[in-house]
Amino acid sequence: MPDPDPAALAFLQRRRSRPAKTLGLPVPDRAALRPLLDMALRCPDHGKLEPWRLVVLERAALARLAGLVGECGARLGRTEEDTAKQRAQFAAAHLAVAVILSPKPSDKIPAVEQSHSAACVAYGLLNAALAAGWGANWLSGWASHDATFARDALGLAEHERITGFIHIGTETSAPPERPRPDTGALTTWMDA
Ligand SMILES: Cc1cc2nc3c(=O)[nH]c(=O)nc-3n(C[C@H](O)[C@H](O)[C@H](O)COP(=O)(O)O)c2cc1C
């Protein structure tokens, strides 16, 4: 028979993100963040390729990223509004961890599986931060998909991609619950 972990199940039943723009100070210091990073990297990884890495963005780094958004937006033809919104993602943040997909050459493990593993890291970090009592939110933002921004902002190599930014901080207001998916409608049970 299974041996349930009620606390873990309760967490998974009620977990939800906290909008990044509502996250304030304090944020976890390096000593508090490190075990959350360990938990995130304890993730499914076909072939043990470790096709990911993390970049912790502290306040000055986030301000630097905010400063790169204008050039990126102009080059990509983004509107002023879009550009301001993207800039604010970094300018208003106190701590974010960039999860980087860093695929490894492999005859056996397809690139898409390595990307799935990086998404597991991001989700694991989101949940670890939430379980530790922090507010957290997984954001990408259009700039994250631009190779030039990724290189200039985070030093990414040509083959690497930003899986997401996990913003972490202190919750300042409770977000309204959003409608959750209809599991029954999305699940097919096959018995033959
Ligand atoms: C890959 C990925 C990228 C996302 N990027 C953004 C984003 O850039 N902006 C945004 O408002 N939400 C974004 N979201 C959605 C937020 O994370 C949202 O808060 C989340 O869906 C809330 O779900 P939860 O409460 O179940 O954690 C993204 C989600 C994923 C999975």
Image (cartoon, rainbow, N blue to C red):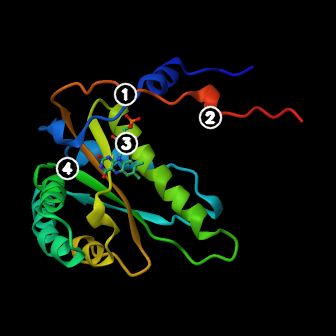
Q: Crowding at label 3, few (<14), some or many (≥20) Cα neighbours within 10 Å?
A: many
Q: CA distance from mark 4 to mark 3?
A: 13 Å
Choose the circle earlier in sequence order: 4 or 1.
4
Number of numbered callouts drawn: 4
Q: Is mark 3 within 8 Å of ligand 1?
A: yes
Label 4 or label 1, whichever lies nearer to me, is 1
Local secondary structure at mark 3: helix
Indicate the amino acid at tag 1.
Arg
Give percent across and percent down for residue 144: 30, 65
Choose the circle earlier in sequence order: 4 or 3.
4
Q: CA distance from mark 4 to mark 1?
A: 25 Å
Q: Please tell me the numbered disc located at residue 186.
A: 2
Q: Crowding at label 2, few (<14), some or many (≥20) Cα neighbours within 10 Å?
A: few
Give percent across and percent down for residue 187: 67, 33
Indicate the amino acid at tag 2.
Leu
Report the residue at 68% width, 77% height from top.
107
Give percent across and percent down for residue 101: 44, 66
Is residue 135 at least partly visible in the picture?
Answer: yes
Report the residue at 28% width, 58% height from top.
141
Q: CA distance from mark 2 to mark 1?
A: 17 Å
Is residue 41 at least partly visible in the picture?
Answer: no
Indicate the amino acid at tag 3.
Leu
Indicate the amino acid at tag 4.
Leu
Q: Please tell me the numbered disc located at residue 169.
A: none
Along the horizontal axis of the image, is 116 left or right of 137? right
Choose the circle earlier in sequence order: 2 or 1.
1
Label 3 sits on residue: 126
Report the residue at 22% width, 71% height from top.
153
Q: CA distance from mark 3 to mark 1?
A: 18 Å
Circles 4 and 3: CB atoms closer than 8 Å: no
Choose the circle earlier in sequence order: 3 or 1.
3
